[in-house]
Amino acid sequence: MSSFDSEPSPPPPLHRDWFFPSAPPYLSPLRTLTKPRKPSLFPSTRRASKHYLRDSRSQRPPAAPPLPARSASGLSSGSFSSSQPPPPPSIPRRDQRYAGVRRKVCFDVTLKKDEKTRSDSGKSAMEHNSTGVKLGAGKIGWPAAVSTALIIMCFASLLHKNFSLQNQVIDLQDQLVVIKSRLQSRLVDSYLDIDEIVSHESSYMYKSLKNSSIVLSLAMLSIPLVIIKYIDCLSMLRKSAESEEVPLNKQLAYRVDVFLSVHPYAKPLALLFATLLLICLGGLALFGATDHSFADCLWLSWTYVADSGNHANSVGVGPKLVSISISFGGMLIFAMMLGLVSDAISEKFDSLRKGKSEVVEKNHTLILGWSDKLGSLLNQLAIANESLSGGIVVVMAERDKEQMESDIAKMEFDFKGTSVICRSGSPLILADLKKSDARALRTVLSLIGVKEGLRGHIVVELSDLDNEVLVKLVGGDLIETVVAHDVIGRLMIQCARQPGLAQIWEDILGFENCEFYIKRWPQLDGMRFEDVLISFPDAIPCGIKVASYGGKIILNPDDSYVLQEGDEILVIAEDDDTYAPTTLPKVGRGYLPKDFVLPKSPETILFCGWRRDMEDMIMVLDAFLAPGSELWMFNDVPENERAGKLAAGGLDLSRLENITLVNREGNAVIRRNLESLPLESFNSILILADESVEDSAIQADSRSLATLLLIRDIQAKRLPVVSHLHRGSFSQVSWIGEMQQASVKSVIISEILDPRTKNLLSMSKISDYVLSNELVSMALAMVAEDRQINDVLEELFAEEGNEMQIRSADLYLQEEEEMNFFEIILRARQRKEIVIGYRLENAERAIINPPGKGVPRRWSSRDIFVVIAEKE
């Protein structure tokens, strides 16, 4: 069988770009080879392509001419070997001419190319085979022509079928577009119907939700009322059954009351809860009555609560009713809120007004408690702080703050820039105690227990000397005590023995004139104390704080003592910044006119009244007086009880060495009782603030003043009249002039508690008075400023050691002798005394730390000097 009788070669593969993406299902095997494309948006272009393809099919190329017949010799010779068939015509698979169906197909060019290819291959085969038969005139046999014709016919049929399929695809695409448009129109209609159905159902559910919201809001409003009514009914039933049981409504009210009272933030939280509840219920009700969303309804509800005028914009009966209800509730809420805020602000201002707030200060003085000494103490602290442009003083007492401020404002003195802050409260933790020393002890315990610690020292005023050891045991090194009764008792005894000493103590203890200061001066190290005395032109040295003795203060040391490193000097000066040492002046020592020793003779002293520390005063007086002295005690305490009281205070009458007690019972404000006493024979008379009235300063001073006037009047009647004596503006014929004459013969010391009484006695000049409260306040203020001064005062008030004394001028100089104050200081050192001031013959007050110490002046033997000397 020849190669021409074999099966025709398969047609060339179809290009995948010839097929449309929307091919029908029966072209599914070829459909996978095509690329999907979107339907054309331009149907006119698609129709143009369709007509173009139809025109292309109508212009098919003519059939190829038949191949020339082969000769018999050619056939017999077998120019083509069956073992080597001719290669099939090759058609490129990806020719650009077949890229798409819209391209123009030219079949005549293709057929001519195929014929040329076959002829070329045939010629090469014939020329290659040397034994083959040569064909005549280039003609090919009919088998090849038949094969070619078959191939062409198959290929043409396939192309025709392909183009027909393409036309069908285009028609189907057009139909699909029409069907899709119809379907979309039908779907839109169906969607409209579905939307109508859904909207109808949603509107039904929306209306149901709004109705439910209205019902829910009404139910939530009704539930509390129902519960309250149920509780009332239940309480009535239980009350009838068991009458002793507390009703349930009262129990509930009690629990609410306790909750609001115990928890500080209960009221604001309850108000906040009520506000949120009203907003939520109002929002629910508005959601049911209006067309707004729930969030908008909540906002509207808040606006109605916050501003009741916003409901005027509501439209419709339902919204108006709901908005009015919310606005009414909002008015109640804001009324309660305003009341709560107003109460909180009022409570805060009340706490500030009542002095309940904290004090945040530093470097200030704290006074705990209130007494009649407070005015004098504040005055002294104000004077002490004047050089610092004022200070801070805090007063805490169990009194109303407004009352304390009112009482302080009534005090007749200038605070000199010092601010006084009052706070109301008790320094004690538990209930008040009766004894003041016990209160002071508990106050000390409270201060010691302060967690932050104390950076200063504590000055405690005590009433009983026996409690001083206990308070110091509790407070330790932080405590400085001032025993008021003991200080006043010792001062009264000193002043009774030395008239005029009360004024000296007022000047030294107060901050108005000169007071004690301690300071170190390194430039004086290595100097003898005798030279230190004349090194300060504006101060008077009177002691040394010895560093080698642990800071012990030595009053009136020896002249030979040499100052060491670390020693400090105790001086009397106007202020701590008004003095400084200078170069050593040249001062003549001189000699004392005579070695004079004061005689110590027995004395007779009268005590009018009874004090708590009477036993302490008796012991001090026994140490000061000469043997054979007498102490008369006139008071309303029964004589048989006095010994027991004195023994209870620690006094052993058998141990008294220098005095003898004489008891007289009577009332010191009744004249006939006083007339029974030998008033003209006493050297000194001490009028004490009686124990029975010492709590009332005015009453105690009135009693003391009445006793003073009665004693002076009785003395004036018994003593002879001195015609040449005049005191101030009072004449000898007046009754007060007679009492002034009597005061020359005897010394009367009155214990005064109220400063206003001081002015009366100062004008009358009938008593060398002692202002007890003021002196104690001065001592407290001085110790508060510098705790080291307390050791100095304790020695000056004690029975042993050094004390303030008044000396006559003839002990140190001759009559009309001219000398300066430095020379008098050095002369007094021969008696181991330190002269701190003087009082001239015609002067009413003494001058402490006089200026111009180096200026000489002429002195009189009737002048007196104030000295610090050892007790005799």
Image: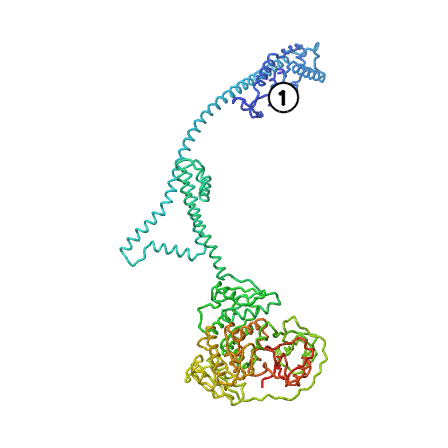
Quadrant in the rendering for residue 126? top right
Q: Is residue 190 left or right of residue 625?
A: left
The relative height of residue 56 versus residue 566 in the rendered view (above or below) is above
Quarter that holds the C terminus: bottom right
Judge whether residue 257 can be spotted in this image.
yes
> Looking at the rendering, which quadrant does residue 144 occupy?
top right
**Residue pushed farthest left?**
241
**539 relative to 210 in the view: left or right:** right
| Residue 531, position as x, y percentages in the image | 69, 80
Between 356 and 195, the one nearer to me in the picture: 356
Closer to us: 849 or 357:
849
Q: Position of residue 25 (x, y in %)?
A: 52, 22
Q: Amino acid at mark 1?
A: Ala
Residue 222 % position (x, y): 36, 45
Q: Secondary structure at mark 1?
A: loop
How many neighbours does mark 1 have within 10 angstroms: few (below 14), some (14-19), or many (20 or more)?
Answer: few
Quadrant placement of the N terminus? top right
Number of callouts: 1
Q: Nearer the viewer, residue 637 or 331?
A: 637
- Quickly name the residue at label 1: 99
Seen at 44% across and 56% down, the residue is 263
Above or below 520: residue 153: above
Depth check, front residue: 791 or 33: 791
Q: Is residue 30 visible?
A: no
Q: What colour scheme has been applied to the protein in the rendered image?
A: rainbow
